[in-house]
Amino acid sequence: MEVLGSLRYSLYMIFHPFDGFWDLKHEKRGNLKTAMIIVAMVAATFILRRQLTGFILNEVKLSELNIIVEILSIVLPFFLWCVANWCVTTLMDGEGSFRDIVITSAYALVPLVLINVPLIIFSNIITLEEAAFYSFFDVLSLVWTVILLILGTSVVHQYSLTRTFLTCICIVVGMGLIIFIALLFFSLLQQMYAFFYTIYQEIALRL
């Protein structure tokens, strides 16, 4: 019942973001379990969108669809945003904990589910001439989510809007830096593996 109540509250929050995000943090109206369910729902929605969108608008070849890749394409950017958010706001005296950031960010994704599920159905009954309506609501879901992420950052860390915009820019840059460092790390591991494997082969040949 707690999860159902939190999911219902998420519908209130996306229409009343300032009060909603405040209550998520200070009145404990949200929880990590519901946050993870929302992230899972977003991932499931995008997998269904890839599979079930009408052929007029669907350029995805089902034979090439990889469910694991689709899940990671949602989950990894989400947690990357949360980690970068926590790193940046810790340096900028933000008041939100990592838990607050995860919950707030997850609840901000609700419009992606709320709009995209009906869009999947709509895409199967429209003509090519009506595709503009599909594109409009598709963009609306993304813009709505971005606005909620920005407002959530503002409320949870008690920032002014100007400071919030600056923080969000730093978060995006931070996400890029994390990706760069991760790629550099894996590249270094690969080179180390190749180096030690070469040494192993040389020793094996000499023995």
Image (cartoon, grey):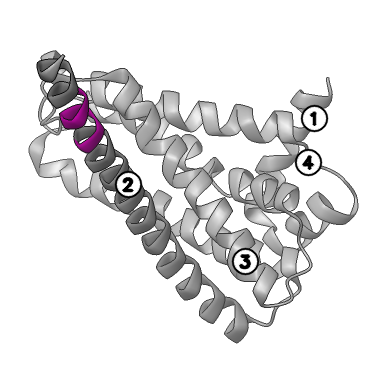
Q: Secondary structure at mark 4?
A: loop
Residue labelled with disc 1: 5
Residue labelled with disc 4: 30
Q: Quadrant of residue 167?
A: bottom right
User: What x and y, as percent, mark residue 112?
Assistant: 45, 41
Q: Is residue 142 above or below residue 54?
A: below
Q: Residue 121: tell me if it is visible.
A: no
Magenta range is 195-200
Residue labelled with disc 2: 138
Q: Quadrant of residue 125?
A: top left
- Distance Cα–Cα, label 1 vs label 3: 22 Å
Q: Are marks 1 and 2 in contact (CB under 8 Å)?
A: no
Earlier-in-chain disc, 3 versus 2: 2
User: What x and y, as percent, mark residue 72?
Assistant: 38, 32
User: What x and y, as percent, mark residue 118?
Assistant: 40, 30
User: What x and y, as percent, mark residue 3?
Assistant: 76, 25
Earlier-in-chain disc, 1 versus 3: 1
Q: Residue at point 73% right, 35% down?
A: 32
Q: Main secondary structure of the magenta part?
A: helix
Dot 4: few (<14), some (14–19), or many (≥20) neighbours within 10 Å? Answer: many
Residue 198 located within the stretch drawn in magenta: yes
- Distance Cα–Cα, label 1 vs label 2: 27 Å
Q: Amino acid at mark 3?
A: Leu
Question: Which one is in front, 77 or 91?
Answer: 91
